[in-house]
Amino acid sequence: MLIVSDTTPIITLMKMGHLDILKQLYGKVLIPNAVYMELTSNEKFVTEASQVMNCDFLEVEEVDNEVI
């Protein structure tokens, strides 16, 4: 099963301390590069960014069919 996530579910699960539930349920979760940048680029959230960067089950993918 292919699972793709936006920013909000990842942030919500992190705040609850249950980000690992994604790994338990799906094994691997794809996130678009834009979502990764949103989760890791804010200097106010270094701890949260570190969690995302160190997740072995979040895989960053380029989106090649973006609609403008």
Image (spheres, grey):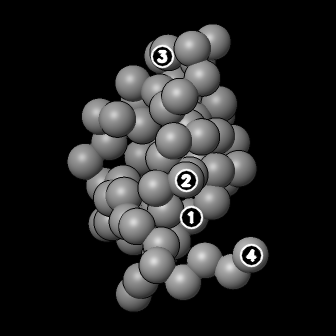
What residue does disc 3 label? 47
Residue 68 - label? 4
* In the rendered image, the vertical position of residue 31 relative to residue 63, given as above or below: above
CB within 8 Å, label 3 to label 2: no
Q: Earlier in the sequence, mark 3 or mark 2?
A: 2
**Of the two numbered discs 4 and 2 in the rendering, the one whose residue sits closer to the viewer:** 4
Residue 5 - label? 1
Tag 1: residue type?
Answer: Ser
Instruction: Give the percent coordinates (x, y) of residue 60.
Output: 36, 58
Compute the Cα span from label 3 to label 1. 20 Å
Q: Nearer the viewer, residue 68 or 14?
A: 68
Quarter residue 52 falls in: top left
In the drawing, does residue 48 fall left or right of residue 42? left
Compute the Cα span from label 3 to label 2. 19 Å
> Residue at (41%, 30%) from the top-left corner?
51
Q: Earlier in the sequence, mark 3 or mark 4?
A: 3
* In the rendered image, the vertical position of residue 39 relative to residue 5, given as above or below: above
Element under label 2? helix
> Residue at (53%, 28%) from the top-left corner?
41
What residue does disc 2 label? 34
* In the rendered image, the vertical position of residue 43 relative to residue 35, given as above or below: above
Q: Quadrant of the N terminus?
A: bottom left
**Of the two numbered discs 3 and 4 in the rendering, the one whose residue sits closer to the viewer:** 4
Can residue 35 be seen at all in this image of the molecule? Answer: yes
Compute the Cα span from label 2 to label 1. 11 Å
Tag 2: residue type?
Answer: Ala
Compute the Cα span from label 1 to label 4. 20 Å
> Badge 2: how crowded within 10 Å, few (<14), some, or many (20+)?
some
Quarter residue 16 falls in: top right
